[in-house]
Amino acid sequence: MLDVQNLDLKYGQSQILFDISLTAEIGQITAVMGNNGVGKTSLLKAISGRHIMAGGVVSIEGDPVRLASAYHAARVGIAYVPQGREVFPMMTVLENLETGYACLPKAEHAIPDLVFDLFPVLKEMQSRRGGDLSGGQQQQLAIARALITQPKVLLLDEPTEGIQPNVIQQIGDALGTLRDQNKMAIVLVEQNADFAYRTADTFTVIEQGRVKRSAAKASYSKEDLMADLAL
């Protein structure tokens, strides 16, 4: 579903990512791992159209796509759940969800049942303001908002950061359900190695802006992952 080839990324004169290649398949969760500052968030920003690439090609279903902005990325089926969640604090839960309609034709402006099936707390809190939710509830809202756009590729940046354990479990269960539906590819940037190894099917480890290793879980133990992360 998602194929990234030879991606370079710069901030001004400083190059952050070097020749990154990554594949994420439908019905799988691909974890992007690495220590702080290696470029994981920058990679997701490039794929989601938030930062223009200096080089490389991103393809969806085999077709190269133009990522001139986040809107262009959303229109071709790339949804991004950013680190820090970025919900609209003064808007209600329902209004936050409805912002996902922006890249859809008017006939498709509806909240799928799946959203409230995955995150029932949001159904109960539709009239509550986003800023009044707990951190875990805001994270669920951010994921749900991304799902409204009907993505082919779902990008998640640190979804367990600062989240209580019971919500981490709910998020893991939701990602498992989405994977099992076999309709999208999921790319997960995560510092929580236990959660990432438990959840993901394949792994790409980044070190100093370059791919250090790409491996399937079947041939990659948790001990291998920890060694690659030097933890």
Image (spheres, rainbow, N blue to C red):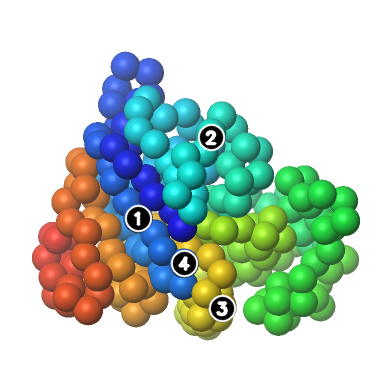
The vertical placement of 26 against 51, above or below, is: below
Of mark 2 and mark 3, the one earlier in the sequence is: 2
Of mark 1 and mark 3, the one earlier in the sequence is: 1
Of mark 3 and mark 4, the one earlier in the sequence is: 4
From the viewer's perspective, tell me whether residue 226 is left or right of residue 170.
left
The vertical placement of 226 against 1, above or below, is: below
Label 4–label 2 contact, CB within 8 A: no
Q: Is residue 181 visible?
A: yes
SS at circle 1 = strand
The answer to which quarter of the image holds residue 122 is bottom right
Q: Residue 73, image x and y in percent?
A: 58, 42
Real-space CA distance between mark 2 and mark 3, rounded to the nearest whole angstrom = 27 Å
- Disc number placed over residue 67 in the picture, else none: 2
The answer to which quarter of the image holds residue 183 is bottom right
From the viewer's perspective, tell me whether residue 44 is left or right of residue 33.
right
Asked whether 12 or 103 is in front, the reply is: 103
Q: Would you name the residue on which mark 4 appears?
A: 26
Real-space CA distance between mark 4 and mark 2, rounded to the nearest whole angstrom = 20 Å
From the viewer's perspective, tell me whether residue 80 is left or right of residue 16.
right
Q: Residue 45, image x and y in percent?
A: 47, 41
Residue at 18% over, 73% down: 220
Of mark 1 and mark 2, the one earlier in the sequence is: 1
Real-space CA distance between mark 1 and mark 3, rounded to the nearest whole angstrom = 19 Å
Label 1–label 2 contact, CB within 8 A: no
Q: What residue type is labelled 1?
A: Thr
- Disc number placed over residue 23 in the picture, else none: 1
Real-space CA distance between mark 1 and mark 2, rounded to the nearest whole angstrom = 17 Å
Q: Would you name the residue on which mark 3 appears?
A: 181
SS at circle 2 = loop
